[in-house]
Amino acid sequence: MSSKKNILALRQKKAIVEKGGGDKAIEKQISMGKMPARVRILALLDEGSFHEYDLFVEHEEQNFGMASKELPGDGVITGTGTIGGAPVCIYAQDFTVMGGSLGLKHARKITKIMDHALKMKIPCIGINDSGGARIQEGIGALAGYGEIFYRNTMASGVIPQLSVILGPCAGGAVYSPALTDFVFVVENISKMFITGPNVIETVLGEKISQEDLGGARVHAEITGNAHFYALSEMECFEQIKILISLIPHNNEERPPAKAPKPPKFRKKIENIIPVDPKQPYDVRDVIFALTDDSKFLEVQELWAANIVIGFGRMNGETVGFVANQPMYLAGVLDCDASDKAARFIRFCDAFNIPIVTLEDMPGYLPGVDQEHAGVIRHGAKMLYAYSEATVPKMTVILRKAYGGGYIAMNSRHLGADFVYAWPSAEIAVMGPEGAANIIFRKEIMEAEDEHAMRQEKVKEYVEKFANPFVAASKGYIDAVIEPSETRELLLHSLSLSKNKDDFRPKKKHGIPPF
Ligand code: HXC
């Protein structure tokens, strides 16, 4: 054959395989409100940047009538490309080919691209849309999953790993996303569960829809498995593009810097906290007043809303924010908030992202529910994550810093590099009411007017402790600052910490309270 004929033959062969499960299956996919796998990849990556691998890989299963079955690409598309110029490895399961089910060769295509990502030290993005382990392949499929989980673990903390759930992700398949850094879900499209509704009905006799069991909102609001929630696939891809622009390619690099911009938030930072210390406010306003262009990419926005986490830029450089949210449960720390913050802190630490902590919280949430849910173990994760982190760590105490919360929110004692407090800061073992009731119990009970005495003792306690000056006098905070000085001081602290080198004892690894 002449080379022209060869090229034409190649193009025809490619076109056939690129059709995946064929026109009918693609139509069905679209009728379900889902983009076909290849379209997804092209929509997410920079135009013309996709380079496909292993298009012609075929399955080798002989049992259950599989020998004669042709599965284009074995149900998964893999390759490389760029997002906003950043190189990435990517795979997308193709539901039009046998429900995107995972057989051994399908898995090996995925593990090959994961190995490539790890070797090239670039992020790996997996788009999941699959019926899970290919039932006809049995142990081969299970082996494939195991090999993926192993690589997820090896790559953890070395390259960013993103999982996009754009269809079913059932059975053990959910554990690959769970091992990755960020999980993206889309309303009405994403479904994640270990045991599907059919099995639940058979075993437990309970009827439940896929949506109620493990739909996008369930994972964005209740379980915390999802980090980003979108109303459409295109919105989800926009979220991925923003995230990729904010994080580094790997753990040896810093996130790419942008041109610095001043915040454009209108409200004056000194007017954000209400005069009445019991009034809530949205701590995200403080973040908007600090970040370049007032931009902030919030992570896990709908789950454990009592703590806010996410990325913004300061002077062009990516910073991770961890902030108590007084608007929700007064900003207390509980099991979920601790898990949420601890994992984020570890991500920032692994990927050289400085952490700014904004503190305003009355402590850990009291009560039987929390105690029995393991608030001791979960709360300890935050202590561990902050203490372990060696990236630059800055804290601004905005208002309440009570008890265990004072310590947990990146206090000096856990290794904070810079601790600032606003004049509105209240640093104490517990809230004034609780404290007065305990230490002045006798005086209050014996007083003629209990209420008046309690008020007097609360006032006494507030005057003594509900301010930043006792902590300042002991050197636990570096400076009491005016709110308007915050951004400038944080920028100064960030520039000072560029070459921070923190000593840690030699060990194989620590044993965090997982
Ligand atoms: C083989 C599968 C498959 C699978 C779907 N298909 N899942 N083939 N193995 N796991 C095939 C279907 O037979 C069908 O083929 C095509 O894909 C499309 O599937 P439909 O059922 O028509 O689609 P839909 O109605 O949208 O339902 C999607 C679904 C359902 C909810 C995902 O297919 C389903 O329940 N599948 C089984 C899910 C499951 O139990 N997986 C195993 C989990 S155990 P045709 O030829 O008709 O088009 C597991 C263990 C892993 O994953 C452990 C790792 C540690």
Image (cartoon, rainbow, N blue to C red):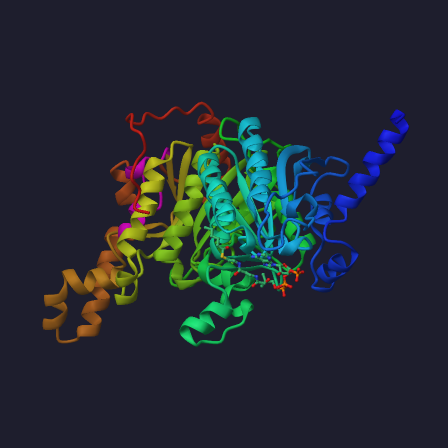
Q: Which of 368 and 316 is in front in this view?
A: 368
Identified at 50% across, 65% down, the residue is 196
Asked if one can make out residue 222 in the rendered structure from this viewpoint, the answer is: yes
Magenta residues (range): 402-417
Is residue 232 in the magenta section?
A: no
Q: Is residue 210 above or below residue 97?
A: below
Q: In which quarter of the image is ligand 1?
A: bottom right
Among the 4 quarters of the image, the one containing residue 373: bottom left
Q: Nearer the viewer, residue 392 or 253?
A: 253
Q: Is residue 52 left or right of residue 350?
A: right
Provide residue 238's location: percent of width, then percent of height: 66, 48
Provide residue 263's location: percent of width, then percent of height: 60, 43
Identified at 26% across, 39% down, the residue is 473
Q: Nearer the viewer, residue 481 or 168?
A: 168
Callout count: 0
The image quadrant where one finds the N terminus is: top right
Provide residue 102's location: percent of width, then percent of height: 57, 49
Q: Nearer the viewer, residue 49 or 344?
A: 49
Provide residue 89's location: percent of width, then percent of height: 62, 36
Among the 4 quarters of the image, the one containing residue 411: top left
Is residue 407 in the magenta section?
A: yes
